[in-house]
Image (cartoon, grey):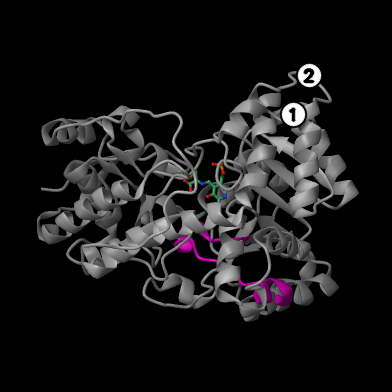
Amino acid sequence: MTRKYMAEPFKIKVVEPIAMTTREQREEAIKRAGYNTFLLRSKECYIDLLTDSGTTAMSDNQWAGMMLGDEAYAGSVNFYQLEGAVQDLYGFKHVVPTHQGRGAENLLSQIAIKPGDYVPGNMYFTTTRAHQELNGANFVDIIIDEAHDSASEHPFKGNVDLNKVKALIEKVGAEKIAYICLAVTVNLAGGQPVSMQNMKELRALTQPLGIKIMFDATRCVENAFFIKEREAAYADKSIREIVKEMFSYGDGATMSGKKDCLVNIGGFLAMNDDMLYQKATQLVVLYEGMPSYGGLAGRDMEAMARGMYESVDYYYIKHRVEQVRYLGERLEEAGVPIVKPIGGHAVFLDARRFLPHIDQDQFPAQALAANLYVEGGVRSMERGIISAGRDKQGNNYHPKLELVRLTIPRRVYTYAHMDVVADSVIELYKQRDSIKGLEMIYEPPVLRFFTARFQPLV
Ligand code: PM9
């Protein structure tokens, strides 16, 4: 089959050999890992699509910046580079670096949440909700219903349902809402964007009531690309202009720099409010370090500042999103059930439709991820009942979406690798009836998906 696609907008200067394994070795490895792909060693994986977090290939420009690390304990040159990049590209006034996204989530949750408060969000994210709940908040899902339907073709499945927000305000009162957590390119919905129109409307609804909007900015550039593609008024705007406008509808953001800032480690909390910033500087010294480094080396802040500028390049982000789409379209053509529309950072397999013979309490997505690893050495991640965890009463959440995420690292793999992945998934789909469910034999109390262990049901 010949296919036209955009070739990589970069040349390869350094290579990293990847491991070739036999089926027998992979069967042994997954057993040792308790059928949890998080517990595999990276050298046991041929194509590693566990996550796009921190797995980016940095550019020569970023590596050059690493040599300009100013490792002063306080007031590093690189902090001011990072602060300048956030102000310039995202428009927020204050920046507190953190070691990664959840460091920022910890600070924000401690500063802004009082026990009994509500934090509405457009679908939960694992670490984000865990920090909110740890600080006594009740998370309320305000995403549109289409987001929970893997087959819905809605172009902005990350959108907030304004009626759900209005109903919550009416029920609990605006003063009980700590802030709205607005994720752009919603990870667990399948990498689905939020429209600019929706952001504007949410702002217009909540600002007069004094309710703050705090973005989860983690995949903001992917969201901007979808806005350019799908919202007519933005077709001629640059990615940079779109990103800046998106953030003008919020009061601050948590950021995992390990995704759209194109670095292997780093994050930050940003905000406009002076008092909130002062509180963040008081807390960051306890958990991360001085407000001018927040758990990062100077060189890491430099790489992140440079990555932020690279990420808003049109050809970079076009290639990224189209490469993900290529993989999704190959699977779709073969009849493999996936979340539609194809998302920004990953293709999500719909385990409910892939394995209809396995009950959700027997962890179909986890079983599918384990079997895909054995089939082709492709490492993926469960995003279903295990990731969703338990409610405050200890009952398992049963999310509508029971998914396996094939997450594409940035600037790492080629289209040939996408073909290998597609072939492995299609082969497994042909043998889907032979896949069996799993039983959980070790469950940690929080964020269980990282370290839980399983065994196959006989
Ligand atoms: N996301 C991911 O693989 C890595 C950890 S969970 C397996 O998708 C959002 C939307 C994220 C995210 C991390 C974080 C936390 C916040 N928001 O991992 O702490 O996708 O930098 O960021 C992961 P950190």
94 left or right of 120 in image: right
Q: Position of residue 28 (x, y in %)?
A: 16, 31
Q: Position of residue 288 (x, y in %)?
A: 70, 29
Crowd tier of the residue under label 1, counting other residues whose Cα lies within 10 Å: few below 14, some 14–19, many 20 or above: many
Q: Position of residue 259 (x, y in %)?
A: 55, 45
171 left or right of 435 in image: right
Is residue 356 found inside the magenta-colored segment of the image? no
Quadrant of res 278: top right
Q: Nearer the viewer, residue 339 or 139?
A: 339
Residue 289 to residue 209: above or below: above
Q: Which residue is mark 2?
A: 73
Q: Nearer the viewer, residue 60 or 297?
A: 60
Instruction: Give the residue drawn at x 20%, y 34%.
Output: 31
Residue 202 to residue 107: above or below: below
Instruction: Give the residue drawn at x 55%, y 71%.
Output: 229
Q: Which residue is mark 1?
A: 293
Please state which amino acid type lies under the numbered disc 1. Tyr
